Image (tube, rainbow, N blue to C red):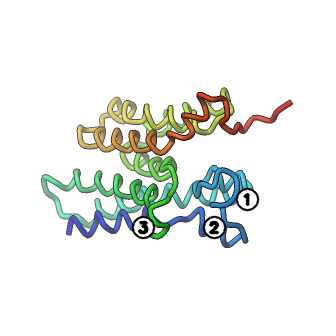
Amino acid sequence: MNSIFLAASYLIGAIPFGLLISKAAGVDVRREGSRNIGATNVSRVLGKKLGFLTLICDVAKGYLPMLLAGLYLPEGETRRQIVSLCGVMAVVGHMFPVYLLFKGGKGVATGLGVFLFFSPPAIAVSLAIFIAAVAGTGFVSVGSLLASALAPVWIWLFGGDGTTVLAAAGIAVLIWIKHRENIGRLFRGEEKTWKKKD
């Protein structure tokens, strides 16, 4: 049963909501903007409403597999570990979706859903950091990198156990790996900003 929940979590995480929503609007988001299927690029290409819808869907596909696993898995020593792994698999699915030949998004919104399941108070702090970082720098990538890196710390401070913190840290590492091109552009001064130029 554990393997079924893990596989289902991956397949749910792999659903490319950003692409499906953009296709419904007559646009292939993979060919516009940053060519990413995530909420940031959908918002940039198609507007904030569809970007927000993508965000909600991507957050949900990180949260719901864990919720369902928690509800239906029997009590036992490995239950918490399997639920946490379901969250990790959902993020992996978003990043490397089988439906799109393993070319997916960067995992921030789906990771947010997982972190939200782990600790809502920790997410409140992380969102504040994200908003402050984006407002201060103009770069969504900076906010995403800072918030994801610090999320495991907040989860730990708010009482997360070792399994939860380890899973959160693993997701943060994956998010940073998927942002390697953004990091390179930031160092070269080529990253796209949300701030309006004078």
Residue at (67, 34) in percent of width and height:
190
Outermost left residue: 77
Number of residues whose C-alpha sits closer than 10 Å to that of mark 2, classed few (under 14), some (14–19) or many (20 or more): many
Disc 3, SS? helix
Instruction: Give how far across and how far down residue 75 sits, in percent.
Output: 16, 59
The residue positioned 55% from the left and 31% from the top of the image is: 129
Q: CA distance from mark 1 to mark 2?
A: 10 Å
Tag 1: amino acid:
Leu
Residue 29: x %, y % from top left = 66, 61
* Residue marked by disc 3: 98
- Whichever of labels 1 and 2 marks the residue nearer the N terminus, that label is 2
Q: Is 188 rendered above or below residue 20?
A: above
Q: Position of residue 166 (x, y in %)?
A: 28, 40
Residue where numbered disc 2 is placed: 21
How many residues crowd mark 1 within 10 Å: few (<14), some (14–19), many (20+)?
A: some
Left/right placement of residue 148 relative to residue 188 reads left
Q: Earlier in the sequence, mark 1 or mark 3?
A: 1
Within 10 Å of disc 3 (Cα), the crowding (few <14, some 14-19, many 20+) is: some
Reading the image, the residue beneath label 1 is 46
